[in-house]
Image (cartoon, rainbow, N blue to C red):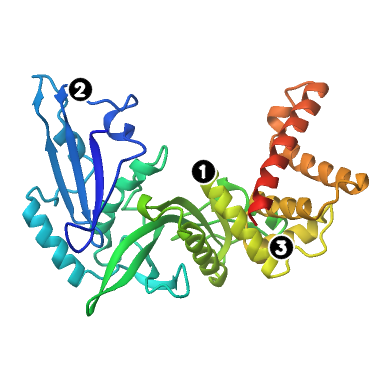
Amino acid sequence: QPLSVSDCEHDETKVQEFSPDFTYPIFGEKEQIFGYKNLSIKLYYASGSLTTYFDVTYDGKVPLADNIVERIKEFIPNDFITNYDTFLQTIKSDSENFKPIGEKFSEYRLNDDDDRVYEIYKATFTTPRFKEFHRRLQIFVLFYIEAGSYIDEEDDKWEIALIFEKKAMGDSKVYSIVGYCTMYLYYFLTSTGNSNENHMNANNKLPLHMSINQGGQIRDNIRVRISQFLILPHYQREGHGSKFYRALYQSFLADPRIKDITVEDPSDKFQEIRDKNDIRFLRENKALEGLKAPVDKNVFNALQKKYKLNKRQMARCIEIELLRNLHKADPVAYKAYRLQVKQRLYLWNEDILRQLDRAERIQKLEETFKGLEEDYHSIILQL
């Protein structure tokens, strides 16, 4: 693995080194670099400001070797440092002077007795210092989110949440970036005749600066779409993902403009985080108590409106909770549950299923249901 990425704290002894999961956005689908012997590519980042040190070394190369420096320069801002001593001086200054960017809206500790506090901030591309910071940060999306890509910093509908670790270092507080989430906010139509159908119609989305009154109404009806959600590798498997998601969700609930929360192509890991935390929140608020299959449509719509989850996620949460409380020894209750889930699966996949004959359709629905039931049981075991 010729490419290494490091997060450097207040001195050179505090280095967290990790290798990218994905490099094909930079080096192509085969993730190969041609023409070098003992190639080493170093990207070091100050843990707060993400000031970057970039260095390439090798023992030899052929005349037509890939131009690695120019290729990587396409993906990082041009303010990187190439002198290591200068970089170390920058780290020291960074630890003394760097402060988080944006507006703080939440904080948490992993343990009550932990002296480290994790602060969460929101920023946009008009926030002072943020555009330059984000240009350094965004390469981690390519490295650690499959099929990840850069977002358009000229689009004013992006909002970004950032986690910073705050810890005492002598008499000062030192901040380090832990992770971040990009969110896209847009208006969506609410029809006075059938609001729930139009809530979920992505074709009705409108830019935030527009307003209309053409048979529908827009009154601060905003859908927030979580696009990229990343905890940096050396902070993973510590509980930050759940803490971060929970803080974001509670901020969405508190914002009266936001009516709907969705996620763009969630990974299996993120879906797991989302399922667990949404269900825990709904349980804490006794939202799912007393539900039995089939769940009344009006009850479903009321829950969706109150808790702002999109239809698919609301259905998942209800189905998982119903399964948790279900006694399979009761064949009538289990049949009602199975039919409710299969009906949803059919409606969501109707175009594909209608192309199959009846026997194939029944078989496919049963296979899909069994797979989903297995996934639900794995979530239940973690609750």
**Pointer 1 with pointer 3, Cβ within 8 A:** no
Q: Nearer the viewer, residue 78 or 14?
A: 14
* 3D distance between C-alphas at marks 1 and 3: 25 Å
Q: Name the residue at 78% across, 39% down.
A: 342
Mark linked to residue 214: none
Mark linked to residue 34: 2
Name which residue type carries label 3.
Answer: Leu
| First reached walking from the N terminus: tag 1 or tag 2 | 2
The percent position of residue 275, horizontal first and vertical second, equals 61, 53
The kind of secondary structure element at disc 1 is: loop
Name which residue type carries label 2.
Answer: Phe
Disc 2 crowd rating (10 Å Cα; few below 14, some 14-19, many 20+) is few
Labels 1, 3: front one: 1
The percent position of residue 244, horizontal first and vertical second, equals 47, 62
The kind of secondary structure element at disc 2 is: loop
Q: Nearer the viewer, residue 339 or 13?
A: 13
* 3D distance between C-alphas at marks 1 and 2: 32 Å
* Res 216 seen here: no
Mark 3 lies on residue: 303
Q: Quadrant of the C terminus?
A: bottom right
Q: Quadrant of residue 2?
A: top left
Mark 1 lies on residue: 267
Q: Quadrant of the N terminus?
A: top left
Residue 102 vs 317, above or below: the answer is below
The percent position of residue 113, horizontal first and vertical second, equals 44, 75
Left or right: residue 89 compared with residue 33: left
Name which residue type carries label 1.
Answer: Ser
